[in-house]
Amino acid sequence: MSSPTVETCAPLAVLGHDVLVPLASGAKVGYAALDYAASSPALQRVWDDVAAYAPYYGSVHRGAGYLSQLSTDLFEQSRRTVAEFLGLREGDQVVFTRATTDSLNLLAGAVPAGTRVFAFETEHHASLLPWAHAGLDVTYLRAPRSRAEAVAALDTALAGAPEGPKLLCVTGASNVTGELWPVAELTAAAHRHGARVVLDAAQLAPHHRVSVRELDVDWIAFSGHKIYAPFGAGVLAGRADWLDAAEPYLAGGGATRTVAREASGPVAVEWHTGPARHEAGSPNVIGAYAIASACRALTEAGWDALEAREQQLVARLKAGLAEIPQVKVLNLFGAAEDPQSVTQVGVLSFVVRGWNSSHFSAALSAEYGIGVRDGLFCAHPLVRTLLGDEEAAPSECGAPEPSLPGERSLNAIRVSFGAGTPDEHIDRFLAAVRELVTDGAAWNYRNEGGRCVATVQSDRGRREG
Ligand SMILES: Cc1ncc(COP(=O)(O)O)c(C=O)c1O
């Protein structure tokens, strides 16, 4: 595959920056990956580390052979690397899971009976839904319109809550607006009322230094595939007591200390405590190793430099979109009081007046080689709140997501990026948005099997040849 000459000043090399994709016209263009919030590209460093380890890959924990022992050491070393990356406290555990969804479902099954969970309705479904699904009582807090309102709403809800164990689940950075949540303040309020906190860091950890110790949260969850390590692993880390007291997440080998036959019938099981308790089955050693490799790469690149670079791109993107009157950027908290403060990561959603979001996203792909996402981003209540007064633009594409009777149902467009994003991707995106808004699409689009595809050239396309 030939490589286009892409001027990149991305701080970290990622795979795929030289991939060419076809446009509706038949021409090929370098792919602009602007959907990091769903899955980021793999870091070259992660890929290289995994490739270097692959010949030495062996079964973990149970093998007597050299490669098994080496793999076991790497797996356990990966746990320590993640613990350091997250700034864990003495005694905290790192449990390897499949991803954030898995981590939060694990915790939902591990909290003491009778725990009342508090969650803002603005959460991603992965942090909104596992609690009720596990049979716990959940208090859903309405969408706050400022950070201070979020803290006050939690404070009030907890003050009125009955005695007993309580847990707040909160996101560090929104997967829709990219906005940072006041995690330290919410945690202080929760702890004042005796509630524990789990931080959904799926969108925070890839963009921002995170310290469990400094934020004082009790647990943290994140996904490898959003932090440049797409090998099917995730993390739940934090306090050991509730995890050790809980039934194992999965029943099976590796989670057991002993399994004895009993004369009367059923077997007697003694389960491990520690991470193994919730890691039954053969562990995903490559996934864990890949996450550890990403943690090392991000740490070595330096968070100050990574964040400064990302904030440059955020500012460039927001300034560019602000010049296009038809574009409405979606925000929950509104403008920052201190314009110098960092208020969001490289995730931003918007709608374009007069356009259907699916149609717009399809044109970005088919006419400019830009990969964004349209939809409700697995945060339906939040996106519906943010889109409350928008008008749906008719289109053959983008059947709106189903809604309750009387509820408006629309889509938004999300652009997201990170440590592998060159300036050119943001510049191409802004130029494309400007051109589509001003001149219209060069192709017509039709819904084919749920996908919005280019069919024939539009009047503009024919005019321009
Ligand atoms: C904020 C947030 N939490 C949780 C998740 C779920 O992550 P995963 O799909 O990796 O389990 C996502 C995924 O988009 C997310 O953005």
Image (tube, grey):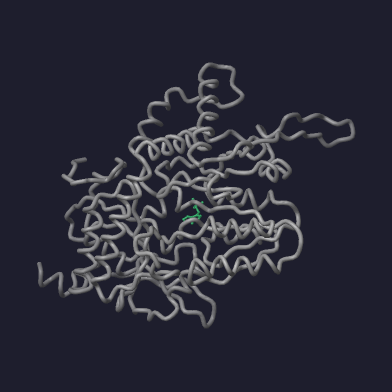
- Rendered location of residue 356, percent (x, y): 33, 74
- Rendered location of residue 259, percent (x, y): 76, 30
Q: Nearer the viewer, residue 233 or 114?
A: 114
- Rendered location of residue 27, percent (x, y): 16, 55
Left or right of 448: which side holds 370?
left
Quadrant location, the C terminus: bottom left
Residue depicted at x 44% and y 46%: 209
In the picture shown, does residue 85 fall above or below 430?
Answer: above
Q: Nearer the viewer, residue 397 or 418?
A: 418
Left or right of 179: which side holds 75?
right
Number of residue marks: 0
- Rendered location of residue 361, percent (x, y): 31, 65
In the picture shown, does residue 450 fall above or below 90?
Answer: below
Residue depicted at x 32% and y 55%: 311
In the picture shown, does residue 14 fall above or below 125?
Answer: above
Q: Nearer the viewer, residue 156 or 321?
A: 156
Q: Residue furthest bottom?
A: 406
Residue depicted at x 43% and y 63%: 176
Quadrant location, the N terminus: top left
Q: Nearer the viewer, residue 174 or 308?
A: 308
Left or right of 254: which side holds 50?
left
- Residue 23 location, quadrant: bottom left
In the picture shown, does residue 364 fall above or below 92?
Answer: below
